Amino acid sequence: MIPAEAPAERDASGPFGSTARRYRRQGWLGTLPLPPKAKEQPPNGFTGQGAPYPDKARVRSWLETKADGNICLRLAEVPRQWLSDDVPPVYAGNNVDGWELFGIDVDDYEGKHGAEQLAELEAELGPLPDTVVSSARWDDSPHSGTRLFLVPKGFRYRGKACATGHTGPKHIDILYAGLRYLLVWPSIHPTGSLYEFRWGRPGGALKTYTDVPPVGDVAVLPEAWFLHLETGMGGNADAKSDMEIGELEEWALRTFRECEGEPCAEMADKLARYIDQLDDSDSHHPMNDVVWSFTKKAIEGHAGWYTVVNEYLTHWRDVTLGKRDDATLTAEALRSIDGALAKAKAEYDDSRGGYLPDDKCSAGAGDVDAWAAKAKAKVDDGVQPQRKLFGANALKAAEQPKFLAKNRIPQAAITVLVGEEGIGKSLFWVMLAAAITTGKPLRELGLPARRPGHVIVVATEDDWSSVVRPRLDVAGADLDYVHVICEEQDGSGAPTFPDDMYLITEANPAPTMVSCDAWLDTVPGNINVQRPQEARRALHPWKEAATQTGAAMVLLAHSNRMPTNNIRDRYGATMALRMKARATLYCLQDADGCLLVGPDKANGAPARVKATRYRIDAVQYFDPKPDHDGKVPLLRFDGQSHKTIKEHLADEVAAEKDRARVVSDAEKWLVAYLSDGPRMAADIYRDGAKSEFEFSRDQLKRAKKRCCAPAFHKQDSPNPDAWWWQLLTDTSGDGRG
C-alpha cells in the first residue's frame, strides 16, 4: 500500500515550487499556491462551488511567481487511471460516473473535541477505513488531521459533521470540491511545524509518506457516511444575476419588504438561533449559509433583511477576528452578500416572475400562506373563468410529454400511488420530496439531478411532528422547499378539494410536486366516490391544477384485498382513480418485507417498465425511550426487479393459492394422522416434516386450526407438560377432565 521513497526531484525555492508538478503527476489536480508559512488566501477564482481548476499554464505561471509559498489542494475529481481497481461501479444505489476527493478534518486540540465527536459518528455510522491523512499536528495532537476519502463526483455536503442529536460546538469540518481547501506536505504551518501525510488511523499505528502519496491509497468513504453528510447535487446549477454588488444592494433595499426595519418574527427567530450557533472553530461555511438563508426568506416576503444580516455579520466578525485580519473578513462578508443577492435576484426575475409577497407574516408563517391569501382575495372578488370556443390552431402548439421520473411520474398530470396500508408507500413520496427539494437524482426511477424544486404536502393520515417531519429530515429533504397545507402549526386541519385548490394553483414559485396522502380524506363529504361520475368530478380539479402549475400530482390511495391477479380490480375506493390518472404506480410488499413499486398505467411510456425494490431501514432520529426506540423508517434502493409489478402481483396471488392448497393437503394429512386418537404435538411436527409433503410447523398449525383440533395436556402421560392434539370427534383417552 505505502510506496517506497521516490527519487528526489530538484527542489525549487519553496513547498509549491518543489512539489506542484509532482502532485499533478500523481493525480492531485487541484494544486494552488499560498503565501509562505500561511494558511490563506489562495488565488482568487479557484475555490468554491463551480470555480475552475488550474490548468498546466496557470500552474507554470504560479511556479514563476509563487514558488516560495505553501501548497494547498482544492479537492478535485480524480482521473480514472489513478484510481485503484476496487472502487465500486455502484455506490449508494447510483451508478458512479466519476470520483472526487473528500476530507473529514478533525480538530482535537485547545479545547476542541473532534476525536470524541468522531467516535460518536463512528458509533452511529460505522468505523472509517484506514486512509491517507494530512496534518501538521502529529506530535501534539495525534487524533487531529484531515482524513481523505473518495466520493462520487458532483455532490454537496454539510459544512460540519456531527452525530444525530449532537448539540453544542462542532469540531469536525468537511472539505470537498465546493468548500475549503487542504494544506499539504511540504507546507509549513504558521507555528513552524511541517505538514505530513500518513496512512492508517490517527491515534493508532501509522505509516509516514516521504513523498506525494498515490491517490490510489485514498479509501472510499463508507456509504452510511456519504448518506449522512450529503445534502444534494453540486455543480453550477445556481443561476446568478450579473449585476454588480452595489446594484444588487440597491435592488435589495428597494425590493425587500421593510428591508432596514424591524425583523419579522421568522427573521428574528432565525437570527437568535444562528447567533447561538456561532462557533469560532468554523466561520466561512456557516456565514455563507446563514446569509443565503436570510436572503431566501427576504424574497419570500419576510421583513428586516438588512437588519438581521448586519447584526449577524457583526457577531460573526467578533468570533472570527482572531483567525483572520479585518480586511480579509470584510472581503469574505462582501463576497457572501454578493453571492446571496445574485442568486436571489436571478430567482426573483426567473422562477418568481418578479413577485414578492407583501403580507405581514406571523411567527412560523411560511410563504405559501402569503401566496394563498393573495390568491383567495381574487376568488373572493368574484373573478370567474370565462370559457370560449377556440380553433385548434389558436391553442398551444404540440409539446413533448415531460416526466418528473422517466416512464413513471409525468409532470403536469396526476399519478396515483396505490398499495395496502402499512407497507411503506408513504415513504416513497417522502423519498421523492427529498430528491426534488435538494436537486438530488434518483437514477433508479429515471429522476435526474436538477435545480431544487418546491413540494407541497397534504398529509392526512400521519402526524406532522412525530411522523412526517422526522421522515423528511431522515430522508434529507430541504424543508425550505417543503410547504404543508393545514390549518394549525401542528399540521392538523386537513384541506378539502377543490375548495382549497387555490393554495396550490396560486403558489409562487409553482410546486414541482404535490403529494396528497391520502386523497380520499380530502374529498368533500357530499361526494360519493363509489359512483364513478362523482369520483371523476372529485378528481378533475387535480387534473386542472396539474395542467395550470406543471406539477406532478401524486395522490395516494389504498388497494383492496380482492384475491385477483388483475391489478385493475385491486384499486380501493373507486376505479375512477385509474381511469382519470395519467399514470399509476402500484406497491407491493415482497416476502422479505421490501417495498416493490412499479407502473401499472403510464400513458406515453413503454409497457414493460420493471418494478423497483426498496428496503426499509430504521434510522436513529429521536433519543431512545422505554415506549419508543427513537428510530424512523427510511427507504433505500435495493435493486431493479426483472419483473413488472403486474408479474409480481400474479406471483403473489399464485403463491397465496399454493399456500391455500398446501393447507388443504395438510388438513387431509392431519385428519388421517389423528383418526386413531390423540397424538403428541412433537410427533406430529416430526412425522409431518418427514411426509411426502414436508409440512412446516406453521402449515400444520394452520391445518390444526381449520380442522378444529384443540391442544391439551394429557395428565396420565409420562410427560404431563407435553402438548397433545386430537380431533373434536375423538373422545378417547382424553385426560382433560
Image (spheres, rainbow, N blue to C red):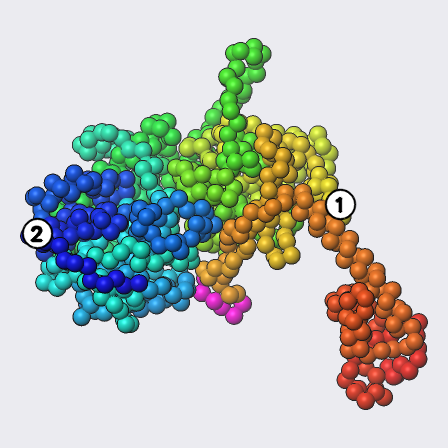
| Residue type, mark 2 in image | Ala
Q: Say few, some or many: other residues with alpha carbon within 10 Å of mark 2 (under 14 / 14 to 19 / 20 or more).
A: few
Q: CA distance from mark 1 to mark 2?
A: 79 Å
Q: 523 or 341: which is nearer to us? A: 341
Q: 193 or 118: which is nearer to us? A: 193
Q: Say few, some or many: other residues with alpha carbon within 10 Å of mark 1 (under 14 / 14 to 19 / 20 or more).
A: some
| Residue type, mark 1 in image | Thr
- Quadrant of the image for the N terminus? bottom left
Label 2 secondary element: loop
Residue 460 visible (yes or no): no
Q: What is the magenta range?
A: 622-627
Circle on res. 564: 1
Circle on res. 12: 2
Q: Is residue 685 above or below residue 706?
A: below
Mark 1, mark 2: which one is toward the viewer? 2
**Which residue does the image show at 32% across and 48% down from the upper left?**
81
Q: Earlier in the sequence, mark 1 or mark 2?
A: 2
State the image coordinates of residue 686 (x, y, percent, origin top left): 77, 75
State the image coordinates of residue 354 (x, y, percent, origin top left): 34, 27
